[in-house]
Every structure is written in structure tokens, then in C-alpha cells.
Image (spheres, grey):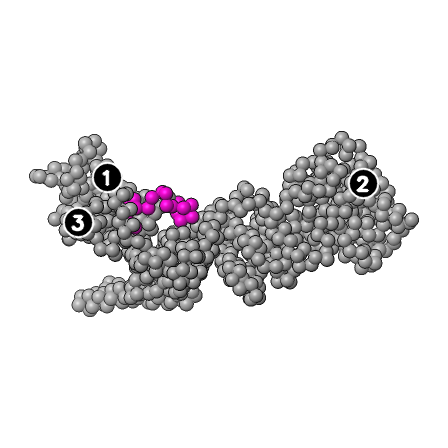
Amino acid sequence: MSARLDGNIILLEGQCRVEDAEPLLGWLQADSSRVVDLTDAEHLHAAVFQILMALRPPIREGEKDAFVHDWLIPILRVARSSDTG
Amino acid sequence: MDDLLQHFTVEARELVQQATDDLLALEREPAIAAHLDGAFRAVHTLKGSVGLFDFAPMGLALHAAEDLLGALKGAEARIDSDVIDILLECIGQAERWVGAIEQTGQLPPDAGEEGYRLARALRSQLDEGAAQAAPMIPEADVGWIDDLLAAGTDRADLKAHNTGLVAIRYTPRADCFFAGDDPLALLRSVPDLVAVRMTNREPWPPAAEIDPFSCNLRIEALSCAEFDAVKTVFRFVPDQVTIHQVARRDTAGIHGAGSDGSPGRETSAVGAASSRMLRVDAARIDRLADLVGEMVVAKNALAHLAALSGEGMDRKDLVQGILASQAAIDRLVADMHRAVMDVRMMPMRDIFRRFPRAVRDTAGHLGKLIDFSMEGEDVEADKSVVEGLFEPLLHVLRNAVAHGAEPENIRLEAGKSTGTRIVLRARRDSDRIIVEVSDDGRGIDPASIRRAAQERGVAPGDRVERMSDAEAMELIFAPGFSTASEITDLSGRGVGMDAVRSAIERLGGQVGVQSLLGRGTTIRFSLPLTIVMTKVMAVRVGGETYGIPIDGVLETAFVAASRILPIQEGEAFVLRDRTLPLVRLADLLGISRIADPGRGAKVLIMSAGDERVGVAVDGFAERMDVLMRPMAGILAGMPGVMGTTLLGDGSVLMILDIPELIG
């Protein structure tokens, strides 16, 4: 399982696939304050990623994968800052 | 090939044909919605069936064609000849792919590139049409590229590559997840990314209403890799992506849009598929099933008779019974033969429908205005006759366009309509079918035929002089009459009318020509409804090959030299305790025998009258079904030869009458 809930933290690990989108959405719909931990994420499927874009949860960043770190996380960061700002 | 794939190829061919028919009709009558609907449905269905297999490039091109047709339906794009051309090109390619699939089970290796090119060309029509139909939408919205450039310039590697950039705007379809696409995986595989921006295409719905499986992303990116390398990444989603080559610090230079020239359109490439399936009217199969049922009854009657004969039935009654049974079986076999022949009957439509497209292409190529029509598509003939007509008819039709049709001004001066009328007509004439190609073009001048025939040495001058005009006209079918100089790339592949004639004769038919100078030409084929095939066995004797009807051959055997006994003048051998005379075919034919190696003989055991006889040959070759033509003219009286047949390689096989040879 590449997406799991640990207390109030949603962990996305390894290769996150399209099937992870639905549980992720459910967890965030239930509690929008949950933190999404991308420390161990190696890839995010577009379906997963667009949920993060849409709901803008707090993100715990990681450097495990260059593509996620260089390109995806900055987009989420911008989305969140425009939200808060 | 598995059943599903086989079924697919049959259906695909029909859909391709349907789409072609509708597109051609649409070009003639753009206002009629039924043509557009028909073409759309055919392409849509074909795309659907392609989706069942791993033929992504084909699906891609068809998908783009479907979208274009959809846009035409929604009046978002205009129907013009460019649109029809690209759609026909796509359909033509699909047809060639179906041919490849039929033969190899897969698409050819270049299909990916070709599918991508077609899809792009189709999409570009769509964009063009959309721009024309709805000019309020800014077509070249390239502002996003500027934004990206601004965002990307802080990256060090952008400065390192000052060669140029590739800008990508990728808007995945909402249902792309269901197709197994992961847009981010594609983005990840774009080489040398320098900037990425992602936005939502539609505003995000409230959190509770988000559909996790509907893609709402728009991805924009810059890469400093080669254009083609980027294009390759998106090769399976060209309809969802626009890729631009951006010159350094410049948004101009849009690269790769539109089609590049028209590739060789060779409609005849689809002509001769090796083993096509046969679609049969269910009623004919029912008829066959009935006959088989009756056959079972007849067999049971025979079994009953056999049982009775074992019980000491009266001899006279037994003979009566056997004769009655034989008569019944005879009748049934004849009926079944007819029923099977019926199954093989197919309408001319199956090949005729391919011609409008071919005529259109040829006319377009040569810049001629042609008014083409067809009659008698429902006329039926044996499958082999109908299919065998395709190539010769194509050739004759192309000739009519290339040589028959005159320039428009000449037609007008002669009081004719501007477009040359070409009619392809089939009709039944007792047990033959007549297929004609008529044009109202320039006609054939018998004087120039005579001149050309003499120049080319087709026939001796004095004979040509004595010929009537009608006879002279027939010289166009003579071998060597068509010269390479008058064969355009369209009207043939280095074959002339003599090839047409031999193709028709191979089907057991005849060709004829009628022409009036200035009024037009009619080429007429007369063919049998069915081809009666004779099974022959080819044998080799003294370096030559002859055919022997297999009916008369009981078996073949190898007889060791030690078992061949000289008896007076002749020879004999023992086969299963019977002594049979042995004759050597070389002697019968008066050919010098290849020196006997003393290793025995290959022998055909044949029945000659009530006797059995062994016929020694040098070797057995293949068995084949041939169309036998009786000997005609001065050869008619030649003893021992039943007829001749043309082999696939054009050589003549003589079919021997062995009983007559033995005398």
C-alpha cells in the first residue's frame, strides 16, 4: 500500500498509483487539517497529485525523488501560498 | 490468427469501405447529413474495435479522424476537399494496416510514426476549421510560453542550453486515467525539463464533490531537449498535447504542424489480400445444412441395404436397391455441389465499391474532371471471378481517366459535358457475366492503332492493312502494344492491356473493345459465372512438366528396378499380386528419356478402360486446381492433349489425356 493513514498524517510512499487517489481524497475530505507526508514518495500519479492541488493540505516535503522534489512539490508550495496569501 | 482478430479484419474492411463510400458521397453532397453520420459511425465503430487490440497508432489516427468528423457534424469545421483528402488518407492507411494485421497479426513497424503524423494532420484540420468557424477564439495563444520562459529563466541549465526550447502544453483528457494514462509519468519522461507549470483546467469543485478519477490538470512545460525527443514522449496522446519549438527568447517558429506532403496513395495495394474470409448469406448455409441432412438419410438407406444383403437378400432386389440409392446420392451430390458454388457467389459490389475512390484519386492526380457511375453492383459471380476482376478493371478504369478523358475545352467544343462520363457496368447474360467500362471521351483512332502496331512490330504490315477497323482496335490487347512511354505511373505498373487480357483469360473470359473516334470507348469483359476447376497432378518428364487429371490417377507408387520385368516389346511390374503393364510417359510423348539410373521408376497407377496401367514419369510435382481450356484452332486435333492451362508464372501447362495416348 503506497498510501496509508498514521494518526493525523497521510503517508504517500514509493510509487503512488491511481488507486491511491480515492483513499487520499477520503482522508482529506474527513479532516482537511491532515498533513500529507511526501518524504518517501518516489512518484505521484496525476490522480493523486491533482487531489493535493485541489485540496492544498499541509505537505511534508522530501528529497527522495528528484522529479517530485524539483517539479511537483514547488507547484504544491505555490498553490498553498496563494491559498494562505 | 485467432478468431477475434480474424473477425476484426473482416469487420474492419467493411467499416473502412463504409467510411470511404460515405466520405466520397459527402464530398459530392456536403449538405446531406446522412453521409456525414454514416462516415462518423463507421470511423467510431472501427476505432472501438481497434481498441480491443494493441494497435495504439491506428486507434490514435482513427480517434483524430472521429474528432474531426464530430467537429464537422457540430459545424465547428467546414467540409472542403482538404478535409476529405486527409480523412480518406487516414482511412486508406487504416485499410493498409488491416492488410498488414491480416498477414502478420500486427501493425508494421513504421505505424507509430505514421499514426502520429495522421493524427496531427487531422488535428490541424480541426484547429484550422475551428479557427475559421469560430474566429473569436484566439488561435495561436502562445502567451503561456512567455510566462513559462519567464519562470524558467532563473534555472541555470536554461542558460547552458541556448540552442532553443521546446514548449509543451499537455491537457490530458478528463477520462485519461481510465485509459491507463498517468500524465505525470509522461511529464517525468520528458528529457531536460527546465520549467513546469500545472493548473486546473476547470475550477476545482468543493472538496466533497471532487471526482478523483476525472483529470482536471493542464500541464505546461519547457524542455531544452530535441523537438523529436519530446514528441516521442507524447506519441500516444498527440490529440491532447501541443508541442512548439521555441527559438531562443522568441515564441515564433512553430514547428511540426500540418501534414508533410501526400505519401504514395496506392489503392491497389489493398487489392489482393491472400486469404480473405467469405461472408455468406445465412439462407445459403441453411440450404447446405438441409442437403447434408438428406445425405445422412441416403447414407442410412445404404447402410440398411448393406445389412439386408448380408441376410441373403434376393440379388435382383439388391441391385434395384443399390441403383435407387446411387441415384439418390447422385442427385444429392449434384445439389450440394450447386449449393457450395452458391456459397462462393459474391456480388460485384464487393469490388466495385473500391473503384470510386481509385477513380477520384487518378482524376485528382491528372487534373481531370470525371463523372463516374456504376451499375449492376448486385450481379453475382463466383468469388474467384469477382476478385480476379479487381486488378484488370482498375487498370481499365485508370486508362479511361488517363487516356479517354479529354481536356474540358475540347469537350465543350465537341458539345459534351465538361466532366467525362465513365460508367462501370455489370450484367448477367445467360450463364456469363458482362462487365463493361464505357467512357464518352476521345475514342480510339484505328489509323493510329495501325501505325503504332506496325511501328512496334506487333503485327506484320500487310496483315494490319487488311484488318477491319474493329479488328485493328483489338490490337491494343496484343503483347508489346503498350509501350513504357505511354504507361503513366497511374495506369499501370509496367503492364499494358495485354496483361489485362491475360488476367481475364485466366478467369476463362474474353475481352473486347468498341470505340468511336470522338465519341468514346467501351472495354468489355465477358466471363463465366463460375470457374470450373479441374484437379490436376503435375508430373515431370524429360525436364518438362505436364498435367494429368487427378480423376484418372488411382495411386502413385515407386517400383524398384528389380521388379520391372521386360515382357516382349514392353515392360510390366507386379503390384499387390497383380501384373500391370508399364508404359513410360517419355516414350508416349516421344521425348528422349533421361538415362535410366537403374533405380526403379516413379509410377502413376491409372485406369485405362477396364485395365490398370502403370505410367512411369521422372517425378511428381504439386497437385493443383486449374482452369482447363480446351485446345482450340489448329491444335484442336492434337491427340493426347485435353487442354492447357495458364500457370501463375504465365507459363502454359499441357494437360494430357493418358488413355488416348496409350491408345
**Comes first in the chain, label 1 or label 2:** 2
How many C-alpha atoms fall within 10 Å of the one at disc 3: few (<14), some, or many (≥20)? few
Describe the element under mark 3 as helix, strand or loop: helix
Q: Is there CB contact under 8 Å for labels 1 and 3?
A: no
How many numbered discs?
3
Which stretch did the figure color magenta?
B476-493
**Comes first in the chain, label 2 or label 3:** 2
The residue carrying mark 1 is B544
The residue carrying mark 3 is B635
Q: Give the alpha-carbon distance from disc 1 to disc 2, as whole Å.
A: 83 Å
The residue at the far right in this view is A85
Q: Give the alpha-carbon distance from disc 1 to disc 3, as whole Å.
A: 19 Å
Pick the residue in front: B352 or B559: B352
The residue carrying mark 2 is B150
> Where's residue A47, x and y in %?
75, 50
Q: Amino acid at mark 2?
A: Ala
**Could you tell me which residue is drawn at 73 percent across and 53 percent down?**
B138
**Comes first in the chain, label 1 or label 3:** 1
> Where's residue B558, x and y in %?
24, 39
Marks 1, 2: nearer the viewer: 2
